Amino acid sequence: MSETATWVLVGLAAVLVAAAVVALVQLARTLKTLQHTLESTGSRVDKALDDLSTTLNRVNRVAGELERGTLQISALFDVLGGVGDALVKIRSSIGTVATVTAALGPMLVAAARGWFRWGGDADEDETPEAPEKAAARAEVER
């Protein structure tokens, strides 16, 4: 090979080495920037994950309290259902007593009036009322 060809090859090699050095320097800067970015992002991600973990712990605690409260309310509704059933039975009993009282009341009033009239408190020429009239009069007087 000639001396000129050798110098051309040396020059080309120098240009290639210079280009490679520039590329490697730029790559080193890029990698250093990437490392800094990843470190700062990593610390932010770690903080965000810690905050998220704290929030999730709070949510889990509140959900547990809500579940316990729901169980207590369920028990309360069961008790209130029993009280409601008892009140329905009492209402039915009161209705029955009221019906019986409404039926017996006029009869007792008429019987008492008849008893007192026949017992000598009434005038001689007065005749005792029919029970239907006595019940009607008792109803009107109420």
Image (spheres, rainbow, N blue to C red):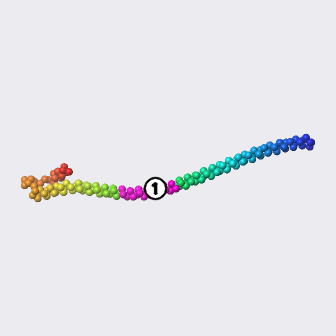
Helix, strand or loop status at disc 1 = helix
Residue 94 visible somewhere in the drawing: yes
- Residue at x-position 84% and y-position 43%: 14
Q: Main SS of the magenta segment?
A: helix
Relative image position of residue 104 (x, y in whole percent): 21, 56
The region drawn magenta spans 61-84
Apparent side of residue 101 relative to residue 51 in the rendered image (left or right): left
Residue 96: quadrant of the picture: bottom left
Residues 139 and 9: in front is: 9
Between 82 and 48, the one lying in front of the other is 48
Lateral position of residue 51 relative to residue 119, left or right: right
> How many numbered tags mark residues here?
1
Q: Where is residue 103 in the image (x, y as percent from the top left)?
A: 22, 55
The answer to whether 16 is drawn above or below residue 101 in the figure is above
- Name the residue at the left extreme: 125
**Residue flagged by tag 1: what amino acid is it?**
Thr
x, y percentage for residue 109? 18, 55
Q: Which residue is drawn at 80% across and 43% down?
A: 19
68 displayed left or right of 4: left
| Residue placed furthest toward the right | 2
Question: Is 63 covered by the magenta stretch?
Answer: yes
Q: Is residue 132 visible?
A: no
Vertical placement of 93 versus 28: above or below?
Answer: below
Q: Where is residue 99 in the image (x, y as percent from the top left)?
A: 25, 55
The image quadrant where one finds the N terminus is top right
- Residue found 28% across the figure and 56% down from its top: 94
Residue receiving disc 1: 70
Crowd band around label 1 with a 10 angstrom C-alpha radius: few (<14), some (14–19), many (20+): few
In the depicted view, which residue is nearer to us: 45 or 81?
45
Residue at 13%, 58% in the rendered image: 115
- Using the rendered view, name the quadrant where residue 88 is placed: bottom left
